[in-house]
Each structure stands twice: as C-alpha cells, then as structure tokens.
Image (spheres, rainbow, N blue to C red):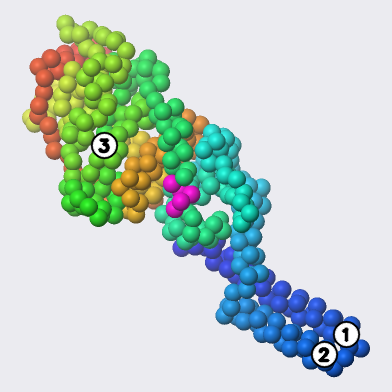
Amino acid sequence: MEPGEIIAAVMAVVNTSCIIVRFIQNQNLRNQESCQRGDESDEDMDTDLSQRTRSRKLDILVAMGQAHAVERRFWARETSTDWWDRIVLQVWDESQWLRNFRMRKGTFLELCDLLSPALKRQDTRMRAALTVEKRVAIALWKLAMPDSYRSVANHFGVGKSVGVVVMQVANAIVERLLSKVVTLGNVQAIVDGFAAMGFPNCGGAIDGTHIPILGPDHQGSQYINRKGYFSMVLQVLVDHKGHFTNINVGWPGKVHDARVFRNSGLFRRLQEGIHFPDQKITVGDVEMLIVILGDPAYPLMPWLMKPYTGALDSDKELFNYRLSKCRMVAECAFGRLKGHWRSLLTRSDLSKTNIPIVIAACCVLHNLCENKGETFMAGWEVEANRLASVYAQPDTRAIRRAQQDAVRIREALKTSFQTDQSNQ
C-alpha cells in the first residue's frame, strides 16, 4: 500500500471519528437547550421540536456517510490544511522531508524563495490562494511519487487542481532556473575531473534516455520506440560529477539518438567550436580540442570520441575501458534523476507540449539536489529499477560515420593510453 493511500485511509478514520464526536456534542447541547426552554409555549415547543428533529436526522445521515453537510466538507479541507501546516511544516524531521520531497526542508524553502515571484497569487473574495510553499510541495510530491492526482489532492486538500499546480511549478522552474542551474560552469574543473578518471581534455559525456508517455492523439506512431512503447527522448550532456550541463527534450521515441543530437543546439555549438573554450592539447603528434564522450550511437567527430566496435585488440579494449569508465557518469545521472523523480518512470498523461516542460523541470531539480549534496536513499534505486524494468531502454544502432581527423585523434589516444599502461 502506497504511503499516500495509508495517510488518506487514516485521515478518513479520523474524519469519521470526529463527526461522531460532534454529533454527540450537538445532542448534549440540544438537551441542555431543551431543559432551559421548559417554560416555553406548546406552540413554540412544537416548532422547536420539528427543527430539532430535522437537524437530528441530518446529523445521523452525516455520521452514516449518507449526506455531506457543508460543515463536514469545510472541516475535511481544514484537516488537510492542518496536516500540511501543523505536521509537515512543524513536526517532520529532515529524513521525512528527504523521503517525501527529495530534499531537506532548508533546500525546499530556498527553492520556494527562488520561485516565489512566479508563483505567488493574490487571495480572492471566494477563497484564499495556495501559498507558494504548498504549491511547490504538491508539485514535488507528484513528481517524486507515482501517486494518483486524487491521492495527492486528498493529502493537501486542493480538490481537482493538482495537475494545474504541477504545471505552474514546472513552468516556473524552467523559466526562472533552467538557464541558471543547467549550465556548463567551470570548464577547467570538468576537464580536470575527467582527466583524473582517465580521459584527457574531456568536457562531458553525452547520452539519451526514453521517458514513457501515453500514446499521443496525433502522429502516435512516431513516438513508438524500438522496444514498442510510446516515449519521448531526453538527451543530456553530463559533467564529471553527474550534473546536467545541457539538455534537449521533446523528440519522439522513434527518432535515433544521432538525429536528435544533430538537430540540437549543442551539436551546432560544438561544430562551430564555441561551446567550449579553444583549449587544445597534443596527443602524440595530433592536436585535440576539448571533446565529449558518447556511445556507438553517436558519430565519431574531432570533438566527440566514441568506443571502437567490431573485432577488438588489447589496445582498443583499453581505449574503450577508459572511455566507458568516464561515460558511466551519464548513466548514473539518469539513474539518480529517475530515482529522485519517479514520475519519469511511469507513463505521463500530460500533453505533448507539457511533457518536455515537466522533464526539464526534473532535470533542474536533479542539479539542485546534487549541488546541495542531498542524500540519495538506497531504497530509491531499488524502486526505480523495479519501475524501469516495465519500460526497458531501447538498444541503439551503431553509427559508423567518422571524419578522418576524428579517426586520427582516436588512434593517437589509443596509443597514448597503451603507452601509459606500459609505463606503470
């Protein structure tokens, strides 16, 4: 049973108990009033009895769950507010915040401050606006848990507005934080980090993953990937610490990773030589720019190294080992992304327009959590692997195209790695 369902069940029992208590209290109060009115006229007594009988019947129906008094609806909503205001905000410790919202309370409040200008709403004459903190909490809960909209609504007492709130927060995250949080940062620190892992002059690892979705109404066949389910592609460039430095999301699942890459802004900037500083090293007798690392699905370019395929000798195996060791940071980053935000592992029912926004927002939240050093709980990986097994990642077809300059650079690196190995 999911935590949300357990809490909803407990709240239902508490609601029923309190309704019965109120019913008994009302009965006692009416008995007292009856004693005080002993000297009233028979006519007044008849009228009063009729009113009391009607009220008593309504109370009994409410207690039995057969009628919904306005008073009960208001009380139920107030109870949900109490859970958030008095329990979550005031009682929960850091481990409860981390387990349910994927971040400690301090990080959560910092996030709320950053999003407040975009999310703050004015109260109306009809109702009080949801606070920024509550809006963000609803969105994080929905993104982190595979709970239904109804379950989340019951938690927070917000009726049918969960989907609206999630998109408001996701849009605010993308608009206000994406360009600040998903960024290249200190290039030299990244190069040094990959060099310590065994690959020189490397500025990142590129990879793609498929996010399962419901079949779109139009052009649905374009979203069916090689595993046979509907998906949307997320392409990322990752630094040595597993932080996303560039993302591209929205391409249909049928599209090959190489095509997604060639149509991205990242490809154009790398091709023009403006994504990284003009920092070259000499490997053997070959000059090498800052490169990124990819799997066989990507083209071999002067600025993109990929593993050897086919028959491999020991030199090629050593090159592949070093490259794969560094490229694993991308796969680990995807694992942590989906472990934090498990909604990415289940089929999204959002529109084709909204899905990329939510995925991008999750990438921003991933970087925020990584930058703040938030703990990644062991149980999350187990649950993520269980959910991921339902929608296995498609195999990618190897691309054999290669530029001659890129071939020479890779050969020089292979020789260099073998020389290093021999000198140890």
Q: Earlier in the sequence, mark 1 or mark 3?
A: 1
Residue type at numbered disc 1:
Arg
- Label of residue 208 in the image: 3
- Label of residue 37 in the image: 1
Q: Position of residue 103 (x, y in %)?
A: 52, 40
Taking the view exactly as shown, the residue that stands out farthest to the bottom is 42
Residue type at numbered disc 2:
Met
Q: Main secondary structure of the magenta part?
A: helix
Judged from the image, the secondary structure of the residue bearing numbered disc 1 is loop
Question: Cβ–Cβ below 8 Å for labels 1 and 2?
Answer: yes
- The structure residue drawn at horizontal position 33% and vertical position 50%, both measured from the top left corner, is 351
Judged from the image, the secondary structure of the residue bearing numbered disc 3 is strand
Assess disc 1: are there few (<14), some (14-19) or many (≥20) residues with their C-alpha within 10 Å of its C-alpha.
Answer: few
Q: Position of residue 309 (x, y in %)?
A: 12, 30
**Which is more toward the observer, 325 or 251?**
251
Residue 334 in which image quadrant:
top left
Total count of labels:
3
**Which is more toward the observer, 153 or 352?**
352
Q: Quadrant of the C terminus?
A: top left
**Which is more toward the observer, 124 or 217?**
124
The residue that disc 2 covers is 45
Judged from the image, the secondary structure of the residue bearing numbered disc 2 is helix
Q: Compared with residue 281, is residue 2 higher up or lower down, i.e. above or below?
A: below
Q: Which residues are magenta?
A: 163-167
- Indicate which label's residue lies in the foreground, 2 or 3: 2
Q: Earlier in the sequence, mark 1 or mark 2?
A: 1
